[in-house]
Image (cartoon, rainbow, N blue to C red):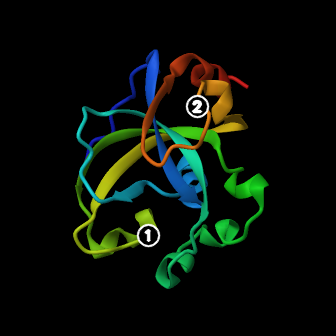
Amino acid sequence: MTTVLPPPPIPDRVLCGPFHRPYGAMAADGVKTIETRGRPWHKEPSWLAIYNCTKIAKLQNEAARQPGADRYTGSDETVIGPDAHVIGMVFIQGSRLLQPEDVPLSFFYEPGRFAWLLTHAIRFVEPIPMQALGIKKGPQSAVWVPGGPLSDARKR
């Protein structure tokens, strides 16, 4: 079992990673506590800002039956958040290989993928447009963004 440590303060620069909708909202709301990726988390435990991609993913059959998933199955932007916006943050404690029994926490399973362990979820009251953080176009991979606006968004 992983011990959940208190997160450090939000730094001056934060890595901002793309999430398909509704997975980003589920992570920011603390419903999804495992993010699946093709590679392990390669940094020390740290904050990750959640950037909503344009793509809306359909929940896999088993994932759609998990408790709490029904709220996220539509395209209502008040629930899943708008695209090209940072909608919240999570703290990544580390990673490990994804297991089939992770579906209730990850809402997805594919052999060989990695589980990023998410804690301390924060959903912003008002999503932040990427342009407000100095990013002109939605990135396809993670980018660094200033931490100040993200810290301010937590207080709204």
Callout 2 secondary element: loop
Foreground residue among 54 and 13: 54
Q: Quadrant of residue 96?
A: bottom left
Seen as rendered, the residue at the extreme bottom is 61
Instruction: Measuring from the top left, give residue 55's x and y in whole percent.
Output: 60, 62
- x then y, percent, for residue 61: 51, 84
The percent coordinates of residue 127 (x first, y second) are 70, 38
Q: Residues within 10 Å of mark 2 (few under 14, many from 20)?
A: some
Q: Which residue is mark 1?
A: 104
Q: Nearer the viewer, mark 1 or mark 2?
A: 2
The three-letter amino acid code for the residue at tag 1 is Pro
The 10 Å Cα crowd at callout 1, few under 14, some 14 to 19, many 20 or more, is: many
Q: Is residue 95 above or below residue 70?
A: above
Q: Which residue in the protein does label 2 denote?
A: 135
Q: Position of residue 89 (x, y in %)?
A: 52, 37
Q: Earlier in the sequence, mark 1 or mark 2?
A: 1
